[in-house]
Image (spheres, rainbow, N blue to C red):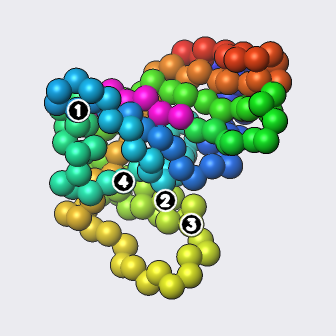
Amino acid sequence: MDETFRRTILRLLNQHRTTRIATLRPDGWPQVTTVGYANDGLVIYFLCGTNSQKAANLARDDRISLTVDDDPAQVLDIVGLSMAARAKLVTDPAEFEKALRLLLSRYPNQQGLDLPIPKASEVCVFRVTPTIISLLDYSKGFGHTDLIAC
């Protein structure tokens, strides 16, 4: 991967905390949900309830699409990324703890929330590994996209 693309992708991932993730429902329709995430380089972690539709969808098919972007006032300031990726359930206890620490660190100044750290029996943590990243940058022209294989 080109180093300039890599730096831009990492900057976008590091400056945001939410993404929209599309999974596939049993009937074949895509389901899009917003989730908080944390990244370790290009690896992204998110969590969801063990009984959620998203967890059920991913147990059947680990393919996802996601987006990370802003909503700038000027259309030519749009910069973001979309990603085709695989989401694997984190089963290793050490990686689970690492992912939770990363996720909690993205929200350091929570007020009025004194929640215990979730247990592995209460939530699923998924590791997202990109396959293809589409880097969108309207400053290079309306709808300009660079496709990057990972």
Residue annotated with mark 1: 25
* Of pointers 1 and 2, the one earlier in the residue sequence: 1
The magenta segment is: 62-67
State the residue at coordinates (58%, 38%).
Answer: 68
Q: Which mark's residue is nearer the viewer, 3 or 1? A: 1
Q: CA distance from mark 1 to mark 2?
A: 26 Å
State the residue at coordinates (38%, 61%).
Answer: 97
| Prevailing secondary structure class for the magenta stretch in the rendered image | strand
* Of pointers 2 and 4, the one earlier in the residue sequence: 4
Secondary structure beneath dot 3 equals loop
Residue 119, percent from left and from top? 27, 68
Query: Disc count in the image?
Result: 4
Residue annotated with mark 2: 103
- Circles 3 and 1: CB atoms closer than 8 Å: no
**Between residues 71 and 104, which one lies in front from this camera angle?**
71
Q: CA distance from mark 3 to mark 1?
A: 30 Å
Secondary structure beneath dot 1 equals loop
The relative height of residue 49 versus residue 88 in the rendered view (above or below) is below
* Amino acid at dot 4: Leu
In the rendered image, residue 63 lying in the magenta stretch gets the answer yes
**Between residues 8 and 79, which one lies in front from this camera angle?**
79
* Amino acid at dot 1: Arg
* Amino acid at dot 2: Leu
- Circles 3 and 2: CB atoms closer than 8 Å: yes
- Circles 1 and 2: CB atoms closer than 8 Å: no
Residue annotated with mark 3: 107
Q: CA distance from mark 3 to mark 4?
A: 14 Å
Secondary structure beneath dot 4 equals strand
Pointer 2 local density, CA inside 10 Å: few below 14, some 14–19, many at least 20: many
Q: Is any part of residue 92 visible from this angle?
A: no
Residue annotated with mark 4: 47
